[in-house]
Amino acid sequence: MTRDQVFEFFRRLAEANPSPTTELESTNPYQLLVAVVLSAQATDASVNIATKPLFEQIRTPKQMIALGEERLRDAIKTIGLFNTKAKNVIALSHALIDDHGGEVPRTREELQALPGVGRKTANVVLNTAFGEETFAVDTHVFRVCNRTGLAPGKTVDEVEAKLEKIVPQPFRRDAHHWLILHGRYICKARLPECWRCPVIDLCRYKPKTPPPEERAKPTAARSGRPKWSKARTATGRTAAKRSGGRSRARPNRLP
Ligand code: SF4
């Protein structure tokens, strides 16, 4: 994608969702850190179900240690890999108290030194808790970046490095939220919902998925340019018109 196309890509995602954030529920950086550790290979929804009652009682590392590994394990037993995750949460709570005065550190190095905390978790915490311009690459971000041609790469590190390089202001802080949500709800893994995608004309993925009513028709009935590719958006403009010859449009929202 060209620089103008990248800008337009994020401008449209921002237009559709001006205030994106993580779907993991928490009330402070410590709870967010725990929630992100628990979310590895699990859905945010499943983590929220387990953490809702847990976080009503546990807001600090000290309280988590007082709860203990066994009761924590029981509280999160509906989440995959709960044994290992309970061990890590107790260990990282000890580390926060011993080395950081009970606070969540604000540097990537310090975060990644905590048990169970990898680069992606550190990026989410730095971005969501502390407003840093980091690019956490999860399975959704990796897929969207490769499919669309936005930031193709063979590894998550490669994709993250490309995002670092190409994402313009004022979209850098919220870019990873937009990409996650786009991947989770529109550019889905098994069947991307291209017919309702706001960046359809900027995306290089082929073939685009037609709307359900078009897919239900026999193949012979589908010929020529599909009418749905000109489907109007909520703003009343077609995807093609929205990008035609436009350079840098002003975003709706500044961070
Ligand atoms: S057009 Fe389809 S493949 Fe491309 S970003 Fe949109 S949903 Fe994903």
Image (spheres, rainbow, N blue to C red):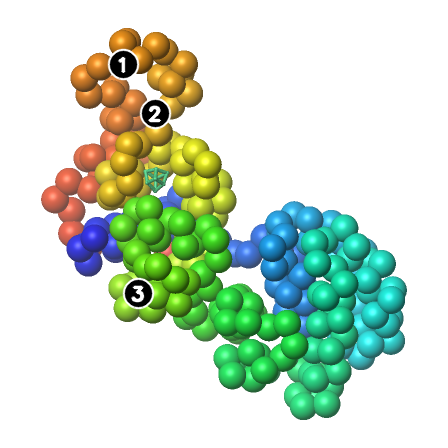
| Residue underneath mark 1 | 222
Residue 80 in picture, x, y percent from top left: 70, 54
Q: Secondary structure at mark 3?
A: helix
Is the residue marked by circle 2 packed among few (<14), some (14-19), or many (20+) residues within 10 Å?
some
Ligand 1 neighbours mark 2 (CB distance < 8 Å): no
Confirm or deny contact between disc 2 and disc 3 (CB under 8 A).
Answer: no
Kindly indicate whether the residue at mark 1 contacts the one at mark 2 (C-beta within 8 angstroms): yes
Q: Gap in Å between the C-alphas at discs 3 and 1?
A: 38 Å
44, above or below 201, in the image: below
Residue in the foreground of this view, choosing between 159 and 172: 159
In three-dimensional space, the C-alpha distance between marks 2 and 3, rounded to whole angstroms, equals 30 Å
As helix, strand or loop, the secondary structure at mark 1 comes to: loop
- Say which residue appears at 87% left-offset and 76% top-offset: 66
Residue 56 percent across, percent down from the top left: 80, 61
Q: Residues within 10 Å of mark 1 (few under 14, many from 20)?
A: few
On screen, residue 135 above or below 200: below
